[in-house]
């Protein structure tokens, strides 16, 4: 199956329920170069929260960024010494219901996608939110990630 990039409306249409959502910040809830949550993201997280457990799992080095999102969305920020795609992050998620299926929502294959695969979660690749203020080092990781994305889809096309 080809990898697809989802908009918030696409995710809304999936009608996700009774799941544990592990949601990325940068490129998903706000662009790397932004410091407030995107209005459409806030709306959709609110809606998803009505029937799912939501945890924020970010590789950002800025703890405040995660705390801000947690406060804004009432989701729980997962503070971990480990970074995606490490499976050890799971140990740092407080009170996770093991009976609920896990879904990772992120914008990068090399971190979020691999993390999902390793923990046995479904991966929903969010269309990346970008800003002119994104740092150059971040832009570089986007180029690499987009390359991997195209490579995987090419390979999957051939397999069909
Ligand atoms: Mg991201």
Image (cartoon, grey):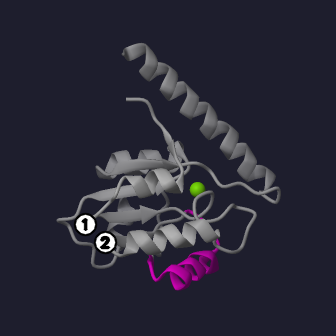
Task: Report the disc number at residue 51.
Answer: 2
| Quadrant of the rendered image holding ligand 1 | bottom right
Q: Is mark 2 within 8 Å of ligand 1?
A: no
Return the residue nearer the eye: 1 or 60.
Answer: 1
Rendering coords of residue 79 (x, y %): 47, 75
Residue 63 counted in the magenta span = yes
In this picture, is 39 found above or below 83?
below
Residue at the extreme left of the image, as rendered? 99
Rendering coords of residue 13 (x, y %): 40, 53
Q: Is mark 1 within 8 Å of ligand 1?
A: no
Return the residue nearer the eye: 149 or 93.
Answer: 149
**Tag 1–tag 2 contact (CB < 8 Å):** yes
Part of the protein shown in magenta: 59-76
Quarter of the image where the N terminus is located = top left
In this picture, is 67 found above or below 51?
below
In this picture, is 132 found above or below 74?
above
- Give the dominant element type of the magenta stretch: helix, strand or loop: helix
Rendering coords of residue 59 (x, y %): 56, 62
In-image side of 40 versus 154 (left or right): right
Mark 2 falls on what kind of element? Answer: loop
- State the image quarter where residue 63 is shown: bottom right
Q: Earlier in the sequence, mark 1 or mark 2?
A: 1
Return the residue nearer the eye: 41 or 144.
Answer: 41
What residue lies at 53% left-to-right and 85% top-to-bottom? 71
Residue under label 1, please give it.
18
């Amino acid at each position: 199956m080809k990898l697809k990039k989802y908009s918030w409306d696409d995710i809304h249409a999936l009608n996700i329920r009774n799941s544990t959502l592990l949601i990325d910040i940068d490129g998903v809830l706000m662009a790397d170069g932004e410091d407030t949550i995107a209005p459409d993201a806030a709306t959709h997280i609110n809606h998803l929260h009505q029937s799912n457990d939501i945890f924020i799992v970010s590789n950002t080095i800025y703890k405040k960024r995660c705390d801000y999102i947690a406060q804004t969305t009432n989701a729980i920020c997962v503070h971990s010494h480990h970074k995606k795609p490490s499976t050890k992050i799971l140990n740092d998620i407080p009170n996770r219901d093991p009976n609920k299926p896990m879904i990772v929502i992120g914008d990068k294959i090399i971190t979020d996608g691999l993390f999902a695969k390793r923990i046995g979660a479904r991966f929903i690749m969010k269309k990346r939110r970008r800003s002119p203020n994104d740092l150059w080092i971040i832009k570089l990781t986007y180029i690499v990630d987009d390359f991997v994305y195209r490579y995987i889809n090419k390979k999957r096309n051939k397999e069909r």
